[in-house]
């Protein structure tokens, strides 16, 4: 939902609410910001009878010269020096009122000459009766909150069991509850069609077994490709995820008569993670569960993931048709000669493409919700995604687990003069590859691009405690941080587009793997939820990415350069405002909010 305050002393607050996150921007064009030191932010929650100033991390060095990991400060004394801010601690379906207090003076003698600017907002419910519900896990095992709550101990090592459960619930947030609720929607006589890459998270497997025992006709397609190998060091690697998937089926007692093993095209992966609910004896498609979340512990508790619940019969029918195509295990097989394998794979791609028409231009994406399935021939869909990022009017955002495809970079490389801002949230830092065969294309703030990547604080840093990562906790092996796959085109505009699903915006995910994506156009509620969650994740990792880059620059820093440690503290004067001058990237971020329309009243 979108909200706007009254203008007070030249300031106006804009807000976008999701489920657990609220994103704010402060329009200051008509305000007197001379001598300004930032904003104190107060939040009033009538439901819980709470009213207090929000906590912050950065402090004035002259006030607290040596903060440590026990330091906790309020924005009342150590303000927010930004015109864009987020509250990541909101609760679902809740009314809040925020008050933004402009502060001036000096750090040890703060003045409050201007009136506070109030704004009332309401967060979205986590479970609704709308066509779409969206569920993000925490996705930040590498966080100060996990460090302080659970001392960086992996969830399965915590004692007593009640503490372990609290950690699991904190990390998963509503994601595990939501998928279990979806499975529970299937009643006796209904049908559940599942299609999974990884199927090794016991709570979900047991919920599906319970559905079978309750009279639900459950049919599963499971990735069971034989891809075992022995590496150069002589270590044997069993087929993944085949071995784990089949072991979980046996453990919970799901009969193999309910399972179709996806074994063809062993060099590619069956990367889907979806279920379709069909109601009654007539098997009417009604609802779909999809997104980026594998059925694994690391997917729910570690890396970033999203589950997307769609209540749309047409979309459900589309997924059911795709499932029906996959159930025969189409494509080239292990013993095929090369000609036969190519013929079978080409026939499979044609069959996927024949399921439905898919636009090759984003302008042709229809209003409402449509689908894209893979594999398919050519790069038209991937190029469409890249043009959505490049041709957005105000703002585009994307999460990428396996780097930035060059088609995106080539289009953005000339984006130097527009007001359009792009955010990339990456698993790893974007840098040249030693094994790369193509010239490296650098895109950065010169191209109106912000980038953040998975990282964590490996050592204590003033008031920030040492963290760990989902990889080090044993939750994830290959992707420790950013596993979600979604794209936002002008999410705060009048006609937002959200692309979300299992595909990694790469050539393999378009041309080779079994994948699915939703194209959601014109749904502001969905766009607002994705936008606020993207902000939560991006700015969590942005701070850590910047810190990592700072540490790498230490050895090459000029002798007389100011210490980069200064950026970890609040400015003692109003020079922080320089970053918001006209034309600056941060000013453009504010303007994305101020151009919003159609506010809640």
Image (spheres, grey):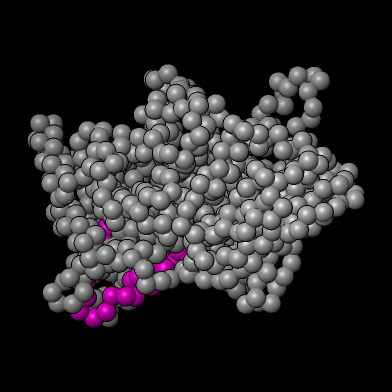
Q: Please tell me in which quadrant of the rendered image residue 81 appears.
A: top right
In this view of the protein, which residue sits in the foreground, 499 or 438?
499
- Please indicate, yes or no, whether residue 501 appears anywhere in the rendered image: no
Q: Name the side, left or right, on which 462 lies relative to 49.
A: right
Q: Please tell me in which quadrant of the rendered image residue 541 appears.
A: top right
Q: Name the side, left or right, on which 97 lies relative to 222.
A: right
- Please indicate, yes or no, whether residue 254 appears anywhere in the rendered image: yes
In this view of the protein, which residue sits in the foreground, 15 or 93?
15
In this view of the protein, which residue sits in the foreground, 427 or 533?
533
The answer to whether 209 is drawn above or below residue 397 in the figure is below
Q: Please tell me in which quadrant of the rendered image residue 335 appears.
A: top left
Q: How many marks?
A: 0
Residue 161 counted in the magenta span: no
Image point (43%, 39%), residue name: 393
The answer to whether 283 is drawn above or below residue 274 in the figure is below
Image point (50%, 34%), residue name: 419
Residue 467 drawn at (x, y percent): 66, 49
Boundaries of the magenta span = 171-198
Residue 193 drawn at (x, y percent): 23, 64
Residue 175 drawn at (x, y percent): 45, 64
Residue 185 counted in the magenta span: yes
Residue 205 drawn at (x, y percent): 35, 67
Image point (37%, 72%), residue name: 129
Q: Name the side, left or right, on which 160 lies relative to 390.
A: right
In this view of the protein, which residue sits in the foreground, 505 or 189?
505
Image point (75%, 32%), residue name: 564
């Amino acid at each position: 939902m979108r909200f706007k305050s009254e203008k007070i002393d030249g300031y106006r607050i804009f807000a976008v609410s999701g489920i657990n996150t609220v994103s704010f921007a402060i329009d200051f064009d008509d305000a007197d910001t001379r001598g300004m030191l930032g904003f104190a932010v107060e939040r009033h929650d009538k439901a819980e009878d709470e009213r207090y100033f929000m906590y912050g991390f950065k402090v004035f060095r002259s006030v607290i010269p040596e903060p440590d990991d026990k330091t906790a400060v309020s924005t009342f004394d150590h303000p927010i020096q930004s015109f864009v801010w987020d509250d990541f601690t909101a609760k679902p379906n809740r009314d809040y009122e925020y008050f933004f207090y402009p502060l001036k003076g000096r750090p040890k003698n703060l003045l409050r000459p201007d009136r506070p600017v109030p704004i009332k907002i309401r967060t979205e419910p986590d479970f609704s009766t709308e066509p779409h519900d969206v569920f993000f896990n925490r996705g930040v095992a590498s966080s100060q909150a996990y460090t302080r709550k659970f001392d960086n101990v992996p969830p399965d090592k915590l004692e007593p069991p009640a503490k372990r459960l609290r950690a699991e619930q904190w990390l998963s947030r509503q994601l595990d509850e939501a998928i279990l609720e979806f499975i529970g929607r299937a009643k006796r006589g209904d049908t559940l069609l599942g299609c999974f890459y990884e199927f090794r998270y016991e709570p979900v497997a047991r919920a599906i077994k319970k559905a079978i025992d309750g009279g639900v006709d459950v049919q599963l397609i499971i990735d069971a490709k034989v891809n075992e190998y022995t590496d150069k060091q002589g270590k044997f690697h069993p087929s993944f995820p085949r071995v784990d998937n089949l072991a979980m089926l046996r453990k919970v007692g799901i009969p193999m008569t309910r399972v179709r093993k996806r074994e063809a095209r062993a060099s590619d992966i069956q990367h889907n993670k979806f279920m379709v609910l069909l109601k009654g004896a007539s098997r009417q498609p009604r609802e779909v569960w999809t997104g980026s979340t594998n059925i694994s512990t690391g997917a729910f508790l570690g890396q970033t993931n999203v589950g997307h619940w769609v209540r749309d019969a047409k979309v459900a029918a589309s997924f059911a048709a795709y499932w029906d195509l996959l159930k025969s295990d189409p494509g080239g097989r292990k013993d095929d000669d090369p000609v036969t394998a190519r013929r079978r794979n080409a026939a499979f791609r044609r069959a996927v493409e024949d399921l439905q028409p898919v636009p090759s231009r984003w302008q042709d994406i229809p209003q409402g919700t449509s689908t894209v399935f893979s594999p398919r021939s050519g790069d038209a869909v991937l190029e469409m995604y890249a043009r959505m990022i490049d041709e957005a009017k105000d703002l585009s955002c994307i999460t990428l687990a396996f780097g930035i495809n060059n088609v995106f970079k080539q289009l953005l490389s000339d984006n130097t003069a527009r007001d359009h801002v792009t955010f990339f949230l990456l698993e790893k830092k974007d840098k040249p590859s030693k094994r790369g065969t193509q010239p490296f294309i650098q895109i950065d703030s010169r191209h109106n691009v912000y980038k953040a990547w998975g990282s964590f604080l490996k050592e204590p840093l003033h008031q920030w405690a040492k963290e760990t990562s989902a990889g080090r906790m044993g939750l994830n092996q290959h992707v420790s941080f950013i596993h979600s796959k979604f794209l936002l085109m002008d999410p705060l505009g009048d006609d937002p587009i959200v692309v979300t699903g299992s595909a990694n915006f790469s050539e393999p995910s378009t041309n080779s793997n079994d994948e699915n994506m939703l194209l959601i156009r014109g749904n502001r509620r969905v766009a607002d939820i994705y936008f606020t969650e993207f902000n939560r994740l991006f700015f969590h990792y942005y701070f850590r990415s910047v810190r990592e880059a700072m540490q790498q620059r230490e050895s090459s820093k000029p002798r007389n350069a100011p210490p980069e440690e200064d950026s970890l503290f609040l400015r003692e004067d109003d020079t922080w405002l320089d970053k918001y001058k006209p034309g600056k990237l941060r000013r453009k971020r504010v303007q994305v909010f101020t151009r919003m329309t159609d506010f809640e009243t």
